[in-house]
Image: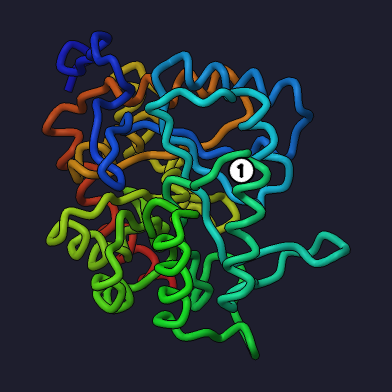
Amino acid sequence: MTAAEHQTDSRTPAPGGTAKLAGRTVARVGFGVMQLGRQPRDPSLAILRQAISAGVNHFDTAHFYGPCNAYIHDALAPYPADLVLVSKVGADHDPDGTPVPAQRPEQLRAQVDANLAELSVEQVDVVNLRRLDAQPGLIAEGDQLVALDDQLAELTALRDAGKIGAIGLSNVSAAQLRQALPAGIACVQNNYSVLDRAGEPVLDTCGEHGIAWIPFFPLGSANWGTFRNVTGNPTVTAIASELAITPAQVALAWLLAHYDDTLLIPGTATPAHLTENIAAGGIHLPAVAITALGHLAERNLRQRKALT
């Protein structure tokens, strides 16, 4: 493959083109704000304004992320009419700042109310319920083991009251998604990347029902070892070198090509990385690259089994 086979559509008005989220039209490359909670206010506001100036109109946040909701308000209010703000509930911090599960219905309601206050809105466009049944992250125990139907009943009541516009799910199985379908599910956020495709059955279910798919950890994590560190994978880096783009752009472009209703929310606190992530929306990988990347998860699984 050659760089000439790789095309970038600089005329796309929205990064990655557009897709539907809860009936709203959003750019397929959005922005996850979590990393901004680890840096001061002024550079965070600059990043948010850079994103919206580049055509991003889907921002993923949470009360759980500390000052991020306040940053969004200070940077973007009064909000543009096409802006879609998505939050998630299911976790919180205890008084000393330690992350803790917050799965009970009354806790979900309190988190929604906190999001409304911090964002200064009457309705959060989409609220994702983060289940804590499995890694990555917190695991629910004791009184935090709450039935999915009870949680959906609370979120449905909040939707009926106008406090949230639509319900999404995060970190769920295909069975849980099918269980939740009668409640009306706008999107699913699950761990998924070109190397880690254990969530494929959930994605298949999304495809059957026209549900937006929002992969988190799309670049993997070095903390999980080289098998899940997407940007360090030899196939990914070789394709990036041949196309004169970054490994992260290869991974993001593959996700966009894999499912038409994929919405990306890559996060960063660095202006240069934000520019690269947004540019990934205009990258069209050659067929040979898509084929090679498509084989990665299967090959990766065989390699992991060989070492056990």
Residue reaching furthest front? 161
Nearer-the-camera pick, 259 or 59: 59
Above-or-below relation of 167 to 121: below
In the rendered image of this protein, does residue 66 appear above or below residue 80?
A: below
Residue at 69% across / 36% down in the picture? Answer: 70
Residue beneath label 1, please? Answer: 34
The location of residue 176, given as percent across then percent down, is 33, 76
Q: Residue furthest bottom?
A: 142
Residue at 45% x, 60% y is 161
Quarter in which the N terminus is drawn: top left
The picture quadrant where one finds residue 114 is: bottom right
* Residue 247 in sight here: no
Question: What is the residue that sits farthest to the right in this orientation?
Answer: 96
Is 33 left, or right, of 160 in this rendering? right
Whether residue 58 appears in this view of the structure is yes
Q: Secondary structure at mark 1?
A: helix
Q: Nearer the viewer, residue 61 or 235?
A: 61
**Above or below 247: residue 307:** below
- Residue visible at 58% across and 58% down? 112
Q: Nearer the viewer, residue 98 or 109?
A: 109
